[in-house]
Structure formats: C-alpha cells, structure tokens
Image: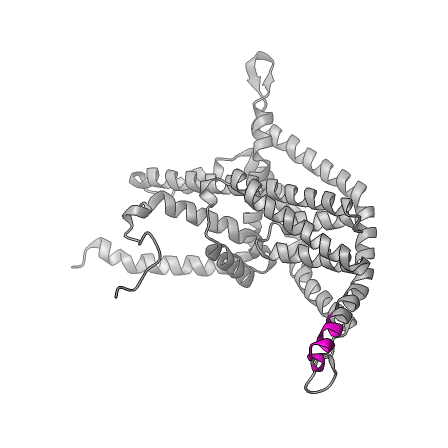
Amino acid sequence: MNTPAVRSVPWVGIAVLLGAALAWALRDILVLGGLAVLLAYALDPFVSRLEQLPLPRKRHLPRALAASIVMLLVAAGAAGLMYLTLPRLATEFGRFLERIPGSLERLLTAARDYAMTHGLGRYFEPGPNGATFDPATIVQYVAQQAGGWLGTLFGSADSVLGLSVLPLLSFYLLAEPHWAARGVLRFVPEGHRDTANRAIAAADNALSSYVRGQAVVCLTVGGFTAIALAMLGIPLSFLLGVIACLAEVLPFIGAAISITAIGLVGFGSSTMDGVFGILAYVGVNTASSYLVTPRVMNRYLELHPFVVILSVLAGGRLLGPPGVVVALPIAAVVHALIKEFGPPAEESGAPAGPVRRQG
C-alpha cells in the first residue's frame, strides 16, 4: 500500500532527526532560553499582581509596563543586595578559603589517629602500597574542579553575553506571556489544537509549580540554616546560609555541597562545631522535606527519586552545570504530559505492588 500517509513517514523521520541535530548544535542557546523561562515564571506572579492594580477610569496597568517595573525593581533590589552583602560575603568567603587547609588537616589527623589504633595505618603511609593525604593537594584538586565548572559557566564571551541578555529574554516573555503558545499553535493542524492546548496547560502548571515551590524551599532552607548556625555560634553562618539556599536548587548534589561547606568551616573551629553544624543543616533540610516541600509542590512534581537522580545526572552529563539546573523542570514537564495524556495507573496494566515470582 502506497498511500500519501505512508509515503510521508520517511520524511517525518528525517525531519525529526534534523530537528534533533539542530537542537543539539544549539543546545547552549536552548539552555539559555530555558533559564529565561524559569526566571519569567518566578517573576510572573508579581507582574500579574501589578497588572491588576486599579487605575482611574477602571483601567489597569499595561502588561508590558508592569513587566518593566518588576524587572527594574528586581535589578535595583539585586544591586542593593549586592552592595550591602558582597563586602561581607567576600570577607567571609576569604576566611572560608583560609580555613580549608586547617580544617582538612584536622580531619585527616583525626582519621590518621583512628586508622593507627585500628590497624589501618598503612593507608596513611607514603609509598607504593599506601596513600599520602596532603591537605594542600586536596585543596588544589578541589579548586581545579570548581574552576572547571566556573570556566564552563563564565569562561567564554558567549556565556557572558548569554547571562547578560537573560533578563531581557525574561522581560519579553513576561510582557507577552501568550506569544510562545500562539506561535506553537500556528503550526498545529486545526483538528489537534485542543490536544496542543492541553499539553501547553500541563507544561505551564508544572513549570509554575516547580519555580514557585523551589523558590520557597530554597529561601526556607537557606534562612533557617543561617539562623541555626548563628545560634550555635558557628563562624561564617551568613555565607553558609547563602550556600545552602543556592545549593538547594540542585537535588541531592546541593545537600552534599552544603554539608561539605558546613563541615569544613565547623571542623576548622572545633569538632563540636562541625558535628552540630552538620546536624543542624540535616535537621533543617529534613524538616523542609517533610513540612515545606509537600505543601508548596503540587501533584505535577510528584517525581520518583529514581527519575530525579537520572534526570540530574543526564542534565549534567549532556549540558554541564546549566543542565543540572534545567534537568528537573524538564522532567517535571515530561511527567505532567504523561499524566495528562497517559492512562490512569489502575488502567495501565502495571502491578499494584512489587512483582513477585509465582511458585
């Protein structure tokens, strides 16, 4: 059978392959667009509130003007926050770097003493069968790895230019929020536009839930971590709170980054500071996971941890550090589309519990 529909199948496959190749070649630009979308979703509630403010003669503020005001306020707020906090952050970060060698030396000394008393001293002896743990070498290695990531983010003119136009891209998305949807629908046949509208609505709900919920979780974890560490008298509590807030964007990886930073600072002061600092962060993070996250993340973000881990690893592997940031919202959108168009769980034929071998 050689119908037109059958003859068009190879061309559709070729078009899909070409589209995938073009997307991969332009992946950096696509990631920049994804970050602009996330920023626009984060600011959209403020623009919508400002747009609805009543004006004389029962008019409302134009959307573009509301978006301009919000972006200017965000820029002014960010500049003011940097002016007030950067000197303190720079001072604390310098003290943090100064403490790293001493903290590592303290930890390695404790580990060496433990190894000597338990017959594991050969692992701390230099030589072909032993390992030499030098704090300076470890610090140099960590600095090289961090520098590699920072170089990936800011090491080229394209990256700097992309970050500089990120607010501008977000502004255009905020000023005309339905522009992208209308552009997509123009290429969808008339008979499939209802399905396309459902898909757009599902993706919109997923991204809104992720961005707003993640913002609340980050601020909660960062704020309470800084307060808890300050109450314990641990040095650099403000900087550590900022690190915990920013690292919370990265699932699983962020917690490891925060624990490492708190441990290095805490153990550099005393063993008890290190132990209690890590316990305080773990307590805050755990309380947030049980009390805050379930309340701010709606049903669209009920992702299985297996999917979350694989998404983060795949994003980092394919796209580098920015890929780790956009991996989870992409997974949330895919999950929302599956829930919207897939069969219900009870009708999908999947077993209700673990598969057991019949005897």
Q: Nearer the viewer, residue 177 or 148?
A: 148
Q: Position of residue 55 (x, y in %)?
A: 60, 16
Q: Position of residue 16 (x, y in %)?
A: 38, 57
- Which quadrant, please, contains the C terminus? bottom left
Magenta-span inclusion, residue 230: no
| Residue extending furthest toward the left | 1
Q: What is the magenta range?
A: 111-122
- State left or right for residue 295 relative to residue 65: left
| Residue extending furthest toward the top | 57
Residue 36 visible (yes or no): no
Chief secondary structure of the magenta span? helix
**How many dots with numbers?**
0
Q: Position of residue 76 (x, y in %)?
A: 73, 36
Residue 252 visible (yes or no): yes
Magenta-span inclusion, residue 117: yes
Q: Is residue 63 above or below residue 278?
A: above
Q: In the picture, residue 194 is in which quadrant?
A: top left
- State left or right for residue 328 relative to residue 108: left
Q: Residue at x 34, y 40 (%)?
A: 195
Q: Residue at x 32, y 45 (%)?
A: 344
Q: How is the model colour-coded?
A: one colour
- Which quadrant, please, contains the N terminus? bottom left
| Residue extending furthest toward the bottom | 128
Q: Position of residue 139 (x, y in %)?
A: 75, 68
